[in-house]
Image: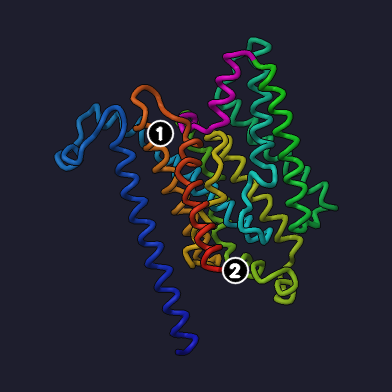
Amino acid sequence: MSLQIIWHKQRWQRQIWLTILLTCLLAAILISLSSGSYHIGLSDWWHGLSETQQQVIWQLRLPRTLLAIAVGGGLALCGAVLQILLHNPVAEPGLIGISSGASLLAVIVIFVGHQCGIMIPAWGISVSAFMGALLVTLLLLRLSQRGQIGGSRLLLLGVAIGISSNALTTWLLYFSDDQALREIMFWMMGSLAYGQIHPAYWWIPFILVCGWLLCQHRQLALLQLGAYQAQLMGLDLRKTHRKLVWAICFISGMCVALAGVIGFIGLVVPHLLRLAGKDGPAFTIPASILAGSLLLLVADVLSRSLVNAGELPVGVVTATIGAPIFIYLLVRRHALAG
């Protein structure tokens, strides 16, 4: 079998997988728009929606659905890129301290606001979370010897920053009053309700950075070969690493700012795709976006449906769904390798 035939076969398989993921995502979008305390059935879609149903969809469910797609896809995209950059199959933005730094600054703002009797708006918490992610990235670049980022160095620095941020967050939680504690804990466990209040122009830079990162699959393919081979192919490692780290920081910071801390998606989605036998940035990057959006959208539907009054934190639902699957696949892969 010639190399050209193999290449066309692999390309056809990638297109089939992406089509399946896209179809599942579209079905999940329809379920998300229909599910909730005010149920909308298929017959309502077929015969036409009433004015009340249209208001529920356009004002409540559609913004939340779009937020789930953006945050889930963004987190999975960052996880896929970071795992290639660090050559670590279990890397995610939280591992290098970006999510921890973002949550720390947001918790500080909430804590100070309650101590001073100031009502902090949701957009203020979002801005503080995004600034926390930027500060962590600046600290990483400063400590990495003038931007010469190595995979192991960046990983160790990120873990140290994450531990320090989590320690400070624990101190703030200990000294918080009951009202501040409830607000902090609900925000740290993730919620898609905050994204409804943000204007549309918040999404423009987010979409642009995600689009740029999606187009970097050729550079990521070279990085996947290793630093030495990438340099032989003419890739500027220092410049490429800095750009990728800043892009990951921006997307992760926006995700935390818009939806709070939602873990596990950036870790499990890219790894699950590789465990399924599908590797290579040309497939992993777009497939991670679709699969991450699908996972968070399903988790959001469950968080709204499992409890009659109120909703569950979506971050808890994602961990509950994904952790057993992730452990099973790891054990299965180890058994097959043995």
Indicate the secondary structure of the residue bearing disc 1.
Answer: helix
Q: Residues within 10 Å of mark 2 (few under 14, many from 20)?
A: few
- Circle 2 — which element? helix
Q: Is residue 55 above or below residue 277?
A: above
Horizontal and vertical percent position of residue 316: 50, 35
Name the residue located 75 percent from the left edge and 72 percent from the top edge: 228
Q: Residue at x 58, y 37 (%)?
A: 256
What range of the chain is rendered magenta? Answer: 177-194
Hey, what amino acid is under mark 2?
Answer: Arg
Residue 233, position as x, y percentages in the image: 70, 76
Q: Looking at this view, is 320 or 184 the one in front? A: 320
Front of the two marks 1 and 2: 1
Please state which amino acid type lies under the numbered disc 1. Answer: Ser
Percent coordinates x, y for residue 138 in the rendering: 76, 43
SS majority, magenta: helix
Say which residue appears at 39% left-offset and 23% top-offset.
310
Quarter containing the N terminus = bottom left
Residue 303, disc: 1
Estimate the spatial distance between the alpha carbons at disc 1 and disc 2, rounded to whole Å. 38 Å
**Residue 59 rendering spot, x and y as whole percentages:** 36, 30
Viewer-closest of 51 and 238: 238
Question: Is residue 190 part of the magenta span, yes or no?
Answer: yes
Q: Is residue 294 left or right of residue 147?
A: left
Check residue 20 in the rendering and tell me which mark sits there, or answer none: none
Residue 299: quarter of image: top left
The residue at the far bottom in this view is 1
Tag shown at residue 218 = 2
Q: Are there few (<14), some (14-19), or many (20+) residues within 10 Å of tag 1? A: many
